[in-house]
Image: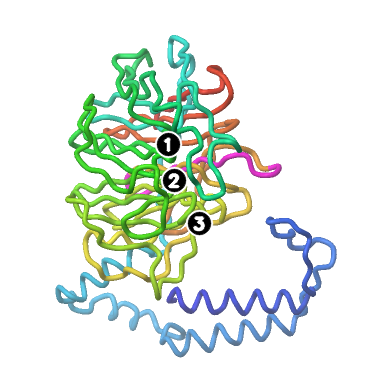
Amino acid sequence: MSRLLFASLYLVLCLGYVAATGSSSNGNHLPTGLGGPGVNLNERFFDQVRALIKRRLQEKGLAGKSQQEQQEQQELPIPMADDALALQNQRSYDNVPIPAASVPTPVLVENWPTEQHSFGQVTAVAVDPQGNPVVFHRAERYWDVNTFNESNIYYLIEYGPIKEKTIYVLDAKTGTIKSGWGSSMFYMPHGMTIDGHGNYWITDVAMHQAFKFKPFSTKPLLTIGKRFRPGSSVKHLCKPTSIAVATTGEFFIADGYCNSRILKFNAAGKLLRTIPQPPEFLSLQVPHAITLLEHLDLLCIADRENMRVVCPKAGLISSHGEGEPAATIQEPDLGRVFGVASYGDIVFAVNGPTSMLPVRGFTIDPRSEAIIGHWGEFKNPHSMAVSVNGSALYVTEIGTNHQTNRVWKYVLA
């Protein structure tokens, strides 16, 4: 059955539910449980829905087929190249769950790191090509109500950049510090990604810029955005949050707190695409983190204030499918999503404090648009990353002291 048919039937069900129960507004983002007080769905409505489903199936030629007809359909000739490409893009959204045996479960590594660190707010973690976790922290800086004015201008420019090292490379086995850099460079660190060549991609929400650096370099190879000048034009950023880099060299910037958009660039920094763009029906509200699933040609977004993960087409393999409805994962227990990280064809995610919901990790299958696992227990997680060989997962938390500003390690078993 096509996604359009599912959407149509879902809309009919929702309308029927409202008609049967009456509309109510309780100020709660979570849906009222079915079977609770006031729920009285009448049988006639469901008879009409069943009839509609049967009629749609017959129109699609999916009902009433004999076993022989189904077998003959499976033996149709292999499609030509153009058709194969279309099928490849279509299969990205096939409602086929990943077998449970192939999905790793994050298991916490106790007593890691082996020594206590005195980090500031650890806003990002990445993993370098050698498998070392790398953290990006704010040292003595904190983001509070006095950090920006109503026009998103950073108030504390006169204090200069953070004088301490803001980037630390850790040992994967022990978590001890191996090296550090990034002193007197950044004002309010936020996102960090390390690509396959070891380049550091960094966002600074105070400077309203995104950078590409060689390790331990003080001069960026590439800069996107205007220094301390927030804006919504294609040449400006406003509090950018995260970067994802493809093996093709193309990269995506989550332009994050103000503009709620994703910008796609080629390797040289030329803008290729804005997500969303008309007629794309996708509304983002603080895209806080992004990750690529290149095999599926998907870009998965932690759409924080919409309390969901959405995965539009990345357009790395082909532009076919760009602008089509994004795979959407939105369930009552997901809450505000702060971090996402890809592992093969699945996505790991962490939520942050959201009403009374538990703060924890999630394992997501974007193809079936479902949460397939829960793990971990946190207080205020902010970012996450998976190691290059897929053996480890790291999660950072931000707080008010060195005990709450930390990084956790999980093995993927």
In the image, residue 26 above or below residue 249: below
Q: Is residue 405 left or right of residue 293?
A: right
Q: Earlier in the sequence, mark 1 or mark 2?
A: 1
What residue lies at 33% left-to-right and 28% top-to-bottom?
185
What residue lies at 21% left-to-right and 70% top-to-bottom?
85
| Residue 368: in magenta span | no
Residue 173, located in which quarter of the rendered image? Answer: top left
Circle 2: residue type:
Lys
Q: Which residues are magenta?
A: 344-356
Q: Are marks 1 and 2 in contact (CB under 8 Å)?
A: yes
Q: Nearer the viewer, mark 1 or mark 3?
A: 1
In the image, residue 364 above or below residue 274: above
Q: Earlier in the sequence, mark 1 or mark 3?
A: 1
What residue lies at 29% left-to-right and 63% top-to-bottom?
273
Residue under pointer 3: 329
For marks 1 and 3, give the CA distance: 25 Å
Q: Nearer the viewer, mark 3 or mark 2?
A: 2
Residue in front for this viewpoint, 235 or 360: 235
Residue under pointer 2: 239
Q: Earlier in the sequence, mark 3 or mark 2?
A: 2
Residue 323 location (% of width, % of height): 36, 70
